[in-house]
Image (tube, rainbow, N blue to C red):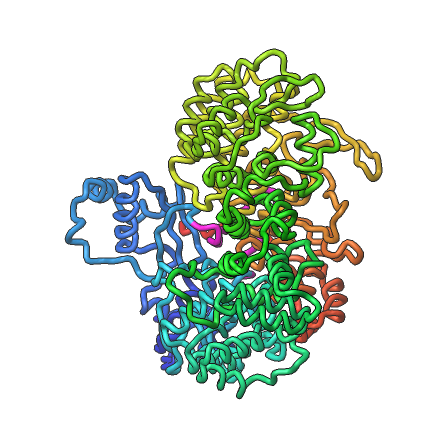
């Protein structure tokens, strides 16, 4: 007679909410058996639970390894509602398991018969269904975020068991924090659901703290925007105390594997380009400032101390002086020790009401100069633009980022880090001849000739503001001859007017050859006389170029709008005997593109008989949308129309070897790279379809170094590292490249990576490690990347595992060792050299886990709930 099974004796600690949640995770997510679960919780909670006790508790709690009937019904109702509005769905369980497509349908069909599914599809019972989705189940759109941990795999590639991921160091904080959500990387300021606060042992915490721990334990420095966003959330949810405990490593329940001695550098080493106003210490709240100083923030401390003193902000200045050991050797203080004249002029630019005082000091410092000579020198020292101008750098470049310590007058421009033209305006009122200043005769024209691209949009606007200040001095300066301010302008003038050794010209003639139209338009606005030389359309046999007739008509009637539109076409080749039949269409299309009238440009290109205009508009809209930063639905619609209706239907008219194709398509490689760098995945997919549709053929070329015969893709720039850049910036972009045939291990079409002119060799693995996103690292490893491929400094190349240790990436190191234990000797070698003590300790104490072996290629990693 069979004996009845005895129930295991009760273990009270298994009723704790924390232990029950741990058991649920291990049973439902990791699919562990009762004996494995017992071993895990005994280790984590110092228990002596038996497998039978765990089994009975799981049965009593009703935990299942598959979705239950109520869960299935709630999921099916949500998926059906989303389908009716055209949205696809995938189910994410515990932030790790992803179910979608046929697998989701099969899983739901187990608990829902056909009648029930029909009722749900018709909306029957939506208002009476009491069951809601539990917090561990999410329904979202596939590929909604490039940070989603998607454990898909390609057949024949490396396979990573899910349990390997759960044994990474970042998952070992369960004693203090919930399971780390790998999908949460950069907090969304509009999504408060990511910042739900829970409590454990009366210590509040949130995903923000997990994010900080992850970045600290992997030596991922936080730049300005990251730090400010996180600190805003810390203040909003009053997490200052828990944050302090985490960073100071005071709590015994935190098992962060980072060396707290490195933390001051972690905070202090911000972006070199960020100024004092962009750092956390730039605050007017003394209490907040004191907390930041306690946390170890030091960047621009000296400069902000001086600023607080100038602003008479006693509270902030007192905190700085109490917590800062100011030294004369501080970099910010050294900025004030350069040429006194340049420093004084900069002070006048920062606050024009100091002009009279500054001039008195400059006169005292330069006794050999007259008062007008001092004023003229001050005008020439106005620091409009300092890049690549070492002789004019006054040593106070960082002062541009200081806040103005003086009250601003009512007519003052909006606060801007660059000097406004108010100081120049005051200088010019003191009786000097503006025509005799070096700033007018030479410097300001050199700056204008560099254009907006080299100067930057904001700096170029500031240069134009100073240029307009000169023009307000009247006709005497507007119509007076000037010497050629630069050799480039002289050459452009000679090309059009066929004049050699010409020593002077009118300002409006010089403005005609500037890259931007604003200076020319300002001269027209202020009534500049138009010399006869501008009205000639004769094609001089010696001239290379002539002025366009339409442009002449536009500036003759002082039509500034038409001048702006026609500026790119103001000068045309003089040797064009036959008129281009498509010249008018081309000009109209380019004007529409310049104004970002994208629909009009698309329609014109579709109507044109020139198929290459389709390519021009297609690529132009792509780069406009990429630069905009947000891919709007209209952009994608226009690109899809151009691709499907235009380019695809005119393939027989497009000759890939023609000069026209080379002209219009030459920017494709740059645009493809920009789409990757800016993470505009929608545009990236269309660009890759465009490349595939044109039946890209590999062509032969020779390596300029070894003369070895290689192949390359003519559409792409073979010097660009598309795959590594995607691995560093965007997981979804990387997936798109791999899906379109890009080699995860190679450069372009399997060609060796080009390292000429570069100090560093990048691979997909090294780029993913540098980026620090674990989702991308997992995908790269799953895709079969070569762990031993050389990367890093070109003079000291290392393998992927060595690079991870060198960068201080603890979790990436643990993952690589788990799936490739044979690389441990290299890891041990790298650990001896690393400055990160926690990395050295971890590697030296690492032991291979026999369970952490990669599965044979082709097996399915996704959690199948069947």
Residue 148 colored magenta?
A: yes
The structure residue drawn at horizontal position 50% and vertical position 74%, both measured from the top left corner, is 281
Q: Is residue 589 left or right of residue 130?
A: right
Q: Position of residue 254 (x, y in %)?
A: 51, 78
Residue 259, percent across and down? 62, 77
> 639 or 119: nearer the eye?
639
Region in magenta: 145-164
Q: Quadrant of residue 17?
A: bottom left
For the question of whether residue 504 can be seen, the reply is: yes
Q: Nearer the viewer, residue 404 or 553?
A: 553
Identify which residue is drawn at 42% across, 59% down: 414
Q: Mainly helix, strand or loop, the magenta region?
A: loop
For this view, does 136 lie left or right of residue 716? left
Asked whether 414 falls inside the magenta stretch, the response is no
Q: Whole-percent x and y of residue 338?
A: 68, 70
Extreme residue in the right direction: 706
User: For this rendering, which residue is in front, 510 or 827?
Assistant: 510
Looking at the image, residue 128 sits to the left or right of residue 68; the answer is left
Extreme residue in the top direction = 578
- Residue at image position (37%, 63%) is 410
């Amino acid at each position: 007679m069979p004996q009845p099974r005895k129930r295991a004796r009760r273990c009270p600690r298994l009723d704790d909410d924390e232990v029950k949640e741990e058991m649920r995770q291990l049973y439902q997510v990791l699919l562990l058996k009762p004996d494995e679960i017992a071993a895990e919780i005994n280790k984590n909670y110092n228990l002596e639970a038996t497998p039978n006790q765990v089994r009975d508790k799981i049965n009593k709690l009703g935990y299942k390894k598959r979705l239950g009937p109520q869960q299935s019904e709630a999921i099916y109702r949500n998926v059906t509602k989303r389908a009716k509005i055209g949205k696809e769905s995938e189910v994410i369980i515990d932030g790790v398991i992803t179910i979608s497509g046929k697998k989701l349908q099969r899983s739901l069909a187990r608990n829902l018969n056909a009648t029930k599914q029909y009722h749900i599809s018709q909306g029957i019972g939506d208002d009476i269904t009491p069951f809601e989705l539990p917090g561990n189940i999410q329904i979202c759109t596939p590929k909604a975020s490039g940070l989603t941990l998607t454990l898909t795999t390609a057949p024949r590639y490396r396979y990573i068991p899910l349990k390997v991921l759960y044994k990474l160091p970042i998952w070992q904080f369960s004693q203090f924090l919930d399971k780390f959500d790998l999908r949460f990387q950069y907090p969304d300021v509009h999504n408060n659901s990511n910042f739900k606060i829970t409590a454990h042992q009366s210590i509040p915490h949130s995903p923000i703290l997990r994010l900080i721990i992850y970045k600290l334990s992997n030596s991922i420095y936080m730049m300005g925007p990251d730090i400010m966003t996180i600190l805003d959330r810390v203040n909003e949810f009053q997490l200052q105390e828990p944050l302090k405990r985490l960073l100071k490593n005071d709590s015994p329940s935190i098992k962060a594997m980072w060396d707290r001695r490195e933390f001051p550098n972690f905070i202090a080493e911000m972006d070199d380009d960020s100024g004092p106003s962009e750092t956390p210490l730039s605050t007017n709240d003394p209490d907040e400032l004191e907390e930041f100083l306690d946390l170890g923030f030091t960047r621009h401390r000296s400069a902000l101390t001086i600023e607080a003193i100038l602003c008479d902000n006693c509270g902030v200045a007192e905190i700085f002086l109490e917590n800062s050991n100011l030294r004369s050797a501080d970099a910010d203080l050294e900025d004030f020790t350069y040429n006194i004249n340049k420093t004084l002029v900069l002070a006048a630019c920062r606050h024009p009401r100091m002009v009279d005082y500054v001039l008195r000091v400059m006169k005292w410092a330069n006794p050999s100069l007259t008062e007008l000579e001092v004023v003229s020198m001050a005008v020439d020292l106005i620091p409009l633009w300092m890049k690549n101008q070492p002789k004019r750098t006054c040593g106070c470049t960082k002062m541009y980022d200081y806040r103005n310590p003086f009250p601003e007058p009512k007519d003052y421009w909006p606060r801007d880090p660059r000097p406004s033209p108010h100081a120049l305006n005051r200088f010019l009122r003191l009786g000097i001849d503006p025509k005799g200043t070096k700033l007018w005769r030479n410097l300001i024209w050199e700056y204008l000739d560099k254009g907006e691209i080299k100067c930057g949009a904001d700096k170029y606007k500031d240069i134009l503001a100073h240029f307009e200040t000169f023009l307000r001095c009247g006709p005497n300066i507007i119509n007076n001859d000037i010497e050629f301010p630069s050799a480039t302008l002289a050459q452009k003038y000679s090309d059009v007017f066929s004049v050699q050794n010409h020593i002077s010209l009118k300002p409006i003639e010089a403005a005609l050859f500037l890259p931007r139209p604003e200076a020319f338009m300002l001269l027209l606005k202020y009534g500049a006389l138009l010399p006869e030389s501008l009205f000639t359309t004769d094609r001089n046999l010696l001239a290379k170029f002539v002025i366009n007739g339409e442009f002449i008509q536009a500036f003759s009637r002082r039509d500034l709008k038409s001048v702006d539109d026609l500026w790119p076409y103001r000068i045309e080749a003089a040797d064009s005997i036959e008129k281009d039949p498509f010249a008018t269409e081309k000009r109209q299309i380019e004007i529409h593109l310049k104004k970002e009238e994208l629909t009009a440009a698309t329609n014109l290109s579709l109507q044109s008989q020139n198929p290459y205009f389709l390519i021009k508009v297609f690529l132009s809209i792509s780069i406009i949308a990429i630069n905009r930063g947000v891919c709007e639905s209209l952009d994608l619609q226009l690109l899809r129309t151009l691709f499907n209706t235009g380019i695809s239907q005119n393939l027989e008219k497009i000759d890939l070897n023609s000069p026209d194709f080379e002209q219009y398509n030459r920017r494709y490689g740059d645009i493809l790279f920009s789409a990757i760098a800016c993470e505009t995945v929608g545009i990236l997919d269309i660009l890759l379809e465009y490349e595939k549709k044109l039946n890209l053929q590999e062509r032969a070329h020779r390596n300029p170094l070894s003369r070895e015969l290689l192949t390359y893709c003519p559409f792409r720039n073979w010097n660009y590292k598309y795959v590594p850049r995607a691995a560093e910036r965007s997981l979804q972009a990387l997936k798109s490249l791999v899906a379109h045939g890009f080699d995860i291990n190679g450069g372009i079409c399997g060609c060796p990576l080009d390292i000429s002119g570069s100090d560093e060799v990048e691979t997909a693995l090294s780029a993913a490690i540098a980026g620090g996103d674990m989702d991308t690292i997992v995908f790269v490893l799953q895709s079969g990347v070569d762990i031993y491929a050389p990367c890093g400094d070109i003079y000291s190349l290392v393998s992927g595992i060595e690079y991870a240790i060198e960068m201080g990436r603890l979790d990436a190191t643990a993952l690589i060792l788990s799936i490739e234990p044979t690389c441990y000797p290299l890891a041990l070698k790298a650990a001896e050299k690393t400055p990160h003590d926690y990395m050295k300790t971890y590697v030296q104490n690492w032991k291979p886990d026999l369970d952490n072996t990669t599965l044979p290629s082709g097996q399915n990693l996704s959690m199948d709930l069947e």
